[in-house]
Image (cartoon, rainbow, N blue to C red):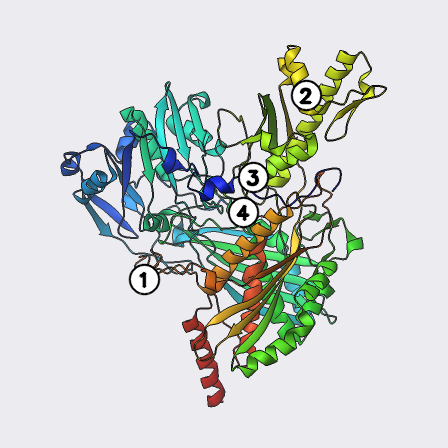
Amino acid sequence: MEKFGKSQSVKRVEDMRLVTGHGRYVDDIAPKDALHAYFLRSPVAHGEIVALDLDDAREMPGVHLIVTVDDLIAAGVKIGLGTTVVKNRDGSRGAKPERPVLARGRVRHVGEAVTMIVADSLLEAKDAAEVIGLEIDDLPVHVDLAVGGDAIHSEAPENKAFDFGLGDEEAVKEAIKDAAHVVTTEVFDNRIIVNSMEPRGCFAEITDGRLHLAFGGQGVWGLKDDLAKHFGLDKSEIRVTNPDVGGGFGMKGMRYPEYFAVSHAARVLSRPVRWMSDRTEAMLSDNAGRDLTTTATLAFDENHRIVAYHLDTVANMGAYNSAYAQPIQTELFAKVMMGTYDVQTAYMGCVGVFTNTTPVDAYRGAGRPEAIFVLERVMDEAARQLRVDPWALREKNFIAPEQFPYTSVTGVTYDVGEFAKVLNRAAQEADRTGFGGRKANTAAKGKLRGQGLCYYIESILGDTVETTKVEFVDGGALIYVGTQSNGQGHETVYAQFLADQTGIPADQITVVQGDSDQIAKGGGTGGSRSVTVQNTATLATVDVMINAFSAFLADDQGVDASAVSFDDEQFRIAGSNLTPTMLEVVDMARHAGRDDLLAHTATIDLENRSFPNGAHVAEVEIDPETGVVTVDRYTVVDDFGNLINPMLAEGQVHGGVAQGIGQALTERVVFDEDGQLLTATFMDYGMPRADNMPMIGFATETTPSLNNPMGMKGCGEAGTVGALAAVSNAVIDALWDVGVRHVEMPFTPHRVWETIKAAKNNSEAA
């Protein structure tokens, strides 16, 4: 990586500030005189609002304002939040129900915001909410993942959000019919709550006649556009900022009702208004993830090569359409999941179902974990049914290096890949040959041991356009970026990369992010795009800087511009011993009155995606007497292309693996038959803990991408992508010896113990 960076494992510079309590999160920076907002939320999943008596609440101490949907309408506020509409297989459009900022006549999930109270203190706002006379006539709920039942929305008969399809269904049916081997299995991907370390929150204020909204999110520009739309304002009248953000995971990349209601209150009162959700409120109102049930079919020829796959998925969309595009998720599901394998025909159908449980489904991880989880679970099932080694089955179906660039049957072109090389490295790092001995030792202790493999591939990019601006100030440089750190270490990576390209000391570079006034446009953070796209823009900006400073030096020294060169640290002039650093040239330009050379910018558009891939190997021990599953060993070998900071990449993988293990072992959202959330606190929801986590072995095998100048592939979601299937396959492998053929996540002690008991009873009955 000599041309594009030094690939150094630099420690995060922001950590000292964040871990010593000096982080500046939205609740830290809200104006001291800000009023407090509190939302009265629906206690039922579905019902008509027949009474909303606010008279007593308005008279409560400290209350300044109570806002209903009628107040918003009267003020001319557009109340319907933007959602994505899907094109159905028959060419019609999927359901497009309104999702109002505040409930409009009817509530459709527990926790839906009905009204907002603004008071001097949070306690006073809560006290006022207690005396509001809210009456709701219950309506039938729909919590089953199935089409049918009383409709939640009139726009969605039978509660069907969409019926999307991709691929050639008839060709796939024919290929399956003629295949030598066919394997079908059903895979359930349990719903989970994001539970970011910092819950959602915001404050709004009017400054110099302009609306300023600060919130914890994944980018500011989409929300700025929406605020302008909802309030009928010119974009120049709005400023949106992101301070430090404590975790996003896709959930904070969406627009939520609270941001618009709080902004309205600040405009009405001409006072700053702040809101921060508590943990249970977040669990009720944040967009959740996963909750997919897929029937997957793989068809093989006589040599065990895949000839077709067919997926039928039911996706629980919650109470409303997602702001993320369901067709995009569905296409990624189908397109990316077969990226590693050479398949002749492929089809996927997806019926989205509305339920009364949560607002919308965020597909945490943007779709890739769901896709790979399904594929690798069915690949493992196929290996068992075909009596094939699961590692060999995958390698047999890999796209070979000489086949690249390779266009899949779903139309995605993959630039590079050496999948067998990565898999073989994983076998070495995981000590695959020693598994038999470890299994024997485990059996001697009366326990079960299993090994699970997942080979994943994902697609990164999101918004393809990004801009970097570098401005020179006294003492160093500012780099303005269009992404938003949610804890990944952007401040370190961006400063480090600019330092590598320019020779400016990293400690003299300040990263500026999350301010729509200072940064005109950006793609935000999501889909593992940030470092690849932003640093590509930085690389283009550095070229602009070098050319501008070279021209300045040439003019200053009376030489031709071609005589000036830059070696990443110093400028050199042929025939001269003048070797200024970039900062020294900046000083020369400043003294020469060339203020036009003190700021430089460039915008890039990456036309093609890159495709991180890798192998995860998990080994679990299971105590058959208690059902306790312990992840004993975990090994990852990734191909992320070239790395800017290997240590931070490994940290991202560790965090992702922890998230994946959490879903596999403990996390699950549970609603009762009335749509009430039973897992609404950390006493009830099984967040992963330190004792769930193994030590994680990490290595990389690099095949640089051809689709960006740095050869990068992205790594933000990779840990989760592989962990779900690796752990699941390991659990099935361990339980196979006691007759268990199927068990679903999460692998809680009770569920595993019951499954072992049932298998034993079935064996005895036979």
| Screen quadrant of the N terminus | top right
Asked if residue 231 is positioned above or below residue 208 in the image, the reply reads below
Asked if residue 676 is positioned above or below residue 752 in the image, the reply reads above
Per the image, the residue denoted by label 4 is 327
Per the image, the residue denoted by label 2 is 584
Quadrant for residue 568, please give it. Answer: top right
Question: How far from the left and from the top, in percent, is residue 43?
Answer: 26, 51
Per the image, the residue denoted by label 3 is 490
Assign a secondary structure to mark 1.
loop
> Can you tell which of label 1 and label 4 is closer to the viewer?
1
Asked if residue 723 is positioned above or below residue 273 in the image, the reply reads below
Cα separation, mark 1 vs mark 2, equals 70 Å
Cα separation, mark 1 vs mark 3, equals 44 Å
Quadrant for residue 709, please give it. Answer: top right
Mark 1–mark 2 CB contact (< 8 Å) = no
Q: Earlier in the sequence, mark 1 or mark 3?
A: 3
The residue under label 3 is which amino acid type?
His
Assign a secondary structure to mark 4.
helix
